Image (cartoon, grey):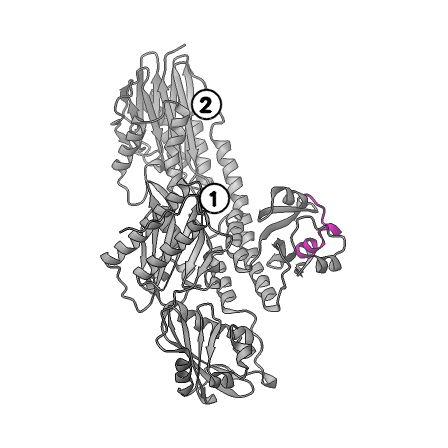
Amino acid sequence: MRENLVPAAGDAADWDERLDDVLTATVEQCGASSGGVYLLRPDEGVLDLAVVRGLPAEFIAPWTRIALTAPAPSSDAARDCRMVWSGSHEDFARLYPRIAVSMPYHFALAAAPICRDGRRWGSLLMLWPGSRPSHLTPADRELIVAGCDRLAELLAGADAAGQPVTAPLRPRVLPRRLAAAKLPEAAATAFAERLPGGSCALDLNGRITFLTDTACALLGAEREHLLGAIPWQTLPWLDDPDFEDRYRAAIISRQPVAFTAMRPPDQWLDFRLYTDGNGISVRITPTSAGRATTPAPGPGGHRPTPVSRAGQLYQIMHLAAALTEAVTVDDVIALVAEQILPAFDAQGLAMMSAEDGRLQVTGYRGYTAAEIARYNEIPLDERTAPMERAITAGVPGFFDDPESLARAFPKVPQVTGKQAWAVLPLVTSGRPVGCCLLAYDQPHRFAGDERTVLTSLAGLIAQALDRAHLYDTKNRLAHDLQQALLPHALPTVDGLRVAARYLPATREMDIGGDFYDLIRLGPTSAAAVIGDVQGHNVPAAALMSQVRTAVHATAGAAPDQVLVRVNRLLCDLDPGLFTTCLYAHLNLAAHRAFVVNAGHPPPLLRPPGRSTTRVLDIPPGLPLGIDAGAAYPITEVEFDIGALMLLYTDGLVESPHTDLDEAIAAVARQLDHAAPDLETMATDLVAGAQRSGQRADDIATFLLEATQPR
């Protein structure tokens, strides 16, 4: 019988518990080693990790918050409503190279969407040891889908009860349900003591839960000092990122791992780790220095303290990989907020720069708009001394509490209620580009290794931010130029209603060559033109302007002669680019349109009375600028009152792996059921292309509707 997933009315606390129970049951039924549930914030387009089981919290710090558009298994599953499967680390590195850099372990992974009645709630993520078969069986898939269905039912029930389940500030980390002991505790301890060497046990968070007397002797510490402690935090000689990395590998891959370490002054020890879903068993045995794999200590018999922990190193690697894909300043700020805040347990972020001697906040998280307004426009003086010093001199500042800030800079006002701050200079090529302010709601001690890691991260952020500023500046200039070349307003023609939209291509596209125009020829006649110049750069935009000017100069002549003359001009100019163009001479009094085509996609016509939209058969001539002798035959089309014609560029219908005729037919069907308002119709036409994400071309749409003359 199916478990009741809906708690008693009014018992809000049970929703989280039921979510935890469903996750636990799904992980156990699928034989996974760990799992987690991501919940979607529709208003922000972000997935938040609500609960995780089988992994320590620090392992998942880089992925507690993922943008829905990010290239990650959980976001791909939720966004595309499909299951993502990676049966090996090689598969994972191929599918998600950015994340694989910070997860160099052997494991299998599945991410599945949590959906119900057309609504996306989030995604389920599960991991298996690398020893698992690399293929996903139908039975495995059914179990995963069933778990997602149960989660969707639970979330829908909570929403219907007015108590929607949301992700907490930090994800809940669930303990593994322990199996019943096979031996009495005293007998188990005696058994371990009789084994050669020392034995100890760690839980999945790395804390020591059991030691034999021999293990205490080999580690050189008392049992009371070790129990409940994390080894690399308690024993300085184990504080090495490589040792912590072996522990991470054991947890994720569930495979035995080993390493050798030296306990000062000269005792070498072998550590062998054996993992299951409940924790790690460790065997410690003495060995000779000749077998050691760890470098010898420095002068004085003590190894230098490493600058960071393994988790922090992977945090740097993950952020570095992510920043290579950040294009705009907003991208950089979002990545820093998603990665740095949870990893360093900070609650506030502000990216700042200086303009004309004043502080400017370019982006922030964890502050209110009112608090940020207090920063903006403040002169760089004693009131902003830590930021001023970081921006102008490249000097970082770390303040553990308000008192330490007040001692260093007495005149700095404390108006936001934060209790600790890290002010990181953003310097690239020896030039400051701003500063990054991390803030904490409670006092926070910045240890030496944490300061080093944050300073290193600031360097990566600075380089990405500098690139992003250049891109934004270039993109803004390109956008302004594009808008200057397009018509600011279309003329009014009696008996004709028009609506147009232009959507530039996404990233890496500079300026588009698409254009449209309406030219008034007389009281009841007009020329409508749309075109697409090859390329996405300044030469393409310049040629587009020349084509528009040439069409204006020749409009009013016979339609075929308009394109013949423009074509000859372009062939004479020889710009090295070709242009597709469609020109329609509209005789509104005679209810006729005379159309010529230079290699452009065919227009669509919806006859009066909301009849079925059809693709007009307009014989295409050669694109402009190829053959000076090209001809362009005229096609006469009925354009009665109430008829609707759509002119468009190929960006509206062309996309990878899509048949062009099918795409045009889909747009025709959209016109059949479009809203009656022309402006709404034009917006809806490009909305689908916007939702499709990355596009290879610009989109221009031009709607023409014949109306009753006034």
Instruction: Name the quadrant containing residue 446.
Output: bottom right
Q: Is residue 296 left or right of residue 150?
A: right
Magenta stretch mostly in which secondary structure? helix
**Membership of 384 in magenta stretch:** yes
Residue type beneath disc 2: Leu
Question: Residue 71, can we see it?
Answer: no
Q: Amino acid at mark 1?
A: Glu
Region of the chain picked out in magenta, as a range:
377-391
Left or right: residue 106 versus residue 231 is left
| Residue closest to the eye, 407 or 530 | 407
The residue that disc 1 covers is 44
| Residue 661 forms part of the magenta stretch | no
Mark 2 vs mark 1: which is more N-terminal?
1
How far from the left and from the top, in percent, is residue 284? 44, 83
Residue ID at (35%, 47%): 152
Q: Position of residue 122 (x, y in %)?
A: 39, 48
Determine whether 504 is above or below 214 in the image.
Answer: above
Which residue lies most toward the right here?
410
Res. 97 image quadrant: bottom left
Query: Mark on residue 260?
Result: none
Question: The residue tagged with tag 2: helix, strand or loop?
Answer: loop
Instruction: Locate residue 267, reporting x and y percent.
Output: 51, 87
Residue pictured at 38% horizontal, 13% vertical: 524
Q: Which residue is mark 2?
A: 490
Viewer-proximal residue, 414 or 708?
A: 414
Mark 2 vs mark 1: in front: 1
- Outermost left residue: 138
Residue 125 left/right relative to 298: left
How would you rate the neighbour count of disc 2 (Cα within 10 Å): few for under 14, some for 14-19, many for 20 or more? Answer: some
User: What's the distance in space between the residues labelled 2 and 1, CA to CA?
Assistant: 36 Å
